[in-house]
Amino acid sequence: TTPHVFLLNFGSRSAFTAAKPDHTNPNWLRVGLAFGTSAFLWGLLFKQHSTDVHEYKVRNGLE
């Protein structure tokens, strides 16, 4: 190979390593954050839906 190709290959080593996740020992902080965020977003969705339904009923004289 030519010297510049060698330097490109040598200089492009990734800073990240590909480690397989350990499914026997989950990262409970990340699991909790994921489920907590999901529950929070669903709560916001239901709250917004209830507000929208109430506004619809008031505007159309149904309530």
Image (tube, rainbow, N blue to C red):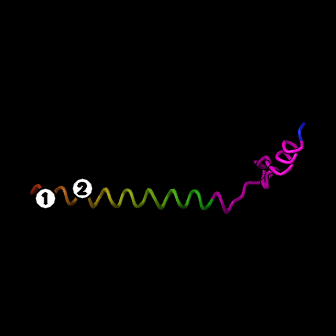
Label of residue 53 in the image: 2
Label 1: how many residues lie within 10 Å, few (<14), some (14-19) or many (20+)? few
Q: Is residue 16 magenta?
A: yes
Q: Relative to 54, is 34 on the left or the right?
A: right
Q: Are marks 1 and 2 in contact (CB under 8 Å)?
A: no
Label 2: how many residues lie within 10 Å, few (<14), some (14-19) or many (20+)? few
- Amino acid at circle 1: Arg
Q: Secondary structure at mark 2?
A: helix
Q: Is residue 18 magenta?
A: yes
Quadrant assignment, res 15: bottom right
Q: Which residues are magenta?
A: 3-31
Q: What residue is at 90 percent from the left and 36 percent from the top?
A: 1
Position above or below: 20 against 62: above
Q: What residue is at 29 percent from the left and 58 percent from the top?
A: 50
Quadrant assignment, res 44: bottom left
Q: Position of residue 13 (x, y in %)?
A: 82, 50
Q: Nearer the viewer, residue 5 or 61?
A: 5
Task: Give the CA separation, mark 1 to mark 2.
Answer: 10 Å
Q: Relative to 21, is 46 on the left or the right?
A: left
Q: Nearer the viewer, residue 20 or 2?
A: 2
Label of residue 8 in the image: none
The residue singled out by tag 1 in the image is 59
Mark nearer the N terminus (1 vs 2): 2
Q: Nearer the viewer, residue 50 or 11?
A: 11
Q: What residue is at 20 percent from the left and 60 percent from the top?
A: 55
Q: Secondary structure at mark 1?
A: helix
- Amino acid at circle 2: Val
Q: Position of residue 12 (x, y in %)?
A: 80, 49
